[in-house]
Image (cartoon, rainbow, N blue to C red):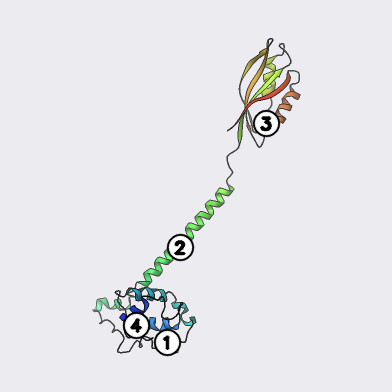
Amino acid sequence: MAFSDLKQLEEHLASRAYIEGFEPTQADVAVYKSIKQAHPDFEYTAVARWFAHIKSYEAEHSSLPGDASKSANLFGGASSSSAPAAKAAAPADEEDDDDVDLFGSDDEQEDAETERIKAERVAEYQKKKAEKSANKPGPVAKSVVTLQVKPWDDETDMEALESGVRSIEKDGLVWGASKLVPVGYGVRMLQITVVIEDEKISLDELQEQIQEEQEEYVQSTDVAAMQKL
């Protein structure tokens, strides 16, 4: 189908994406080149949309499918008397305006490039943020534990017992407050708080160490309470 004017082309493109078929072809290239020389007006919205789209393929025009020779006169040729006339020459100080693309497709390309760069930067930021989060160690898991340390009898030196318990030093272990709690028959046990890092300290091993190193004073140990921090 040949087009005698932009109005006819507008009606054709109102319900189509391309001049022929469902992809850009030499038919689109031929009409595009004719219209580009004629400087179409903005009032034809369908043509404006199509024109900007085909312009984005300019670098690939020669490789688009179709027969260029058969499509050459689809718009009657740029010099045809039926083609829209070019605008009159502008005053000397406005001569450069003749080269302006009235469809603003250059601005569209610049906007698209800006958006592309912005999207790349956002993606790069998100990637670095994800990598940083993956490499960042999580919070150290800790527990606060209340230990009960029972002496052999009422004659056990409780000050020496507590001093012996506190003498145990380990990475990830911090001794806290303590008190003596009556058990019966004059016997008192040591109740002491300790904060441990779960990955570094084993409570079973700590209790065994207390009982082995302070066997002169300690009969047994128990965990009275434990809470994750």
**Which corner quadrant holds the C terminus?**
top right
Residue at 43 percent of width and 63 percent of height: 115
Residue beneath label 4, please? Answer: 37
Query: Residue type at mark 1?
Result: Ser
Measured as percent of width and height from the top left, residue 134 is found at 58, 49
Q: Which mark is residue 71?
A: 1
Measured as percent of width and height from the top left, residue 193 is found at 62, 24
Q: Mark 3 against mark 4, which lies toward the viewer?
A: 4
Residue beneath label 3, please? Answer: 170
Q: Earlier in the sequence, mark 2 or mark 1?
A: 1
Residue beneath label 2, please? Answer: 117
Determine crowd level at label 2: few under 14, some 14-19, many 20+ residues with C-alpha closer than 10 A.
few
Q: Mark 1 against mark 3, which lies toward the viewer?
A: 1
Element under disc 4? helix
Residue lying at the far front in this picture: please name it: 15
Q: Quick check: 219 above or below 61?
A: above
In three-dimensional space, the C-alpha distance between marks 2 and 1, rounded to whole angstroms, equals 37 Å
Task: Left or right? Give the position of 24 relative to 98.
Answer: right
Query: Residue type at mark 2?
Result: Ile
Q: Are marks 1 and 4 in contact (CB under 8 Å)?
A: no
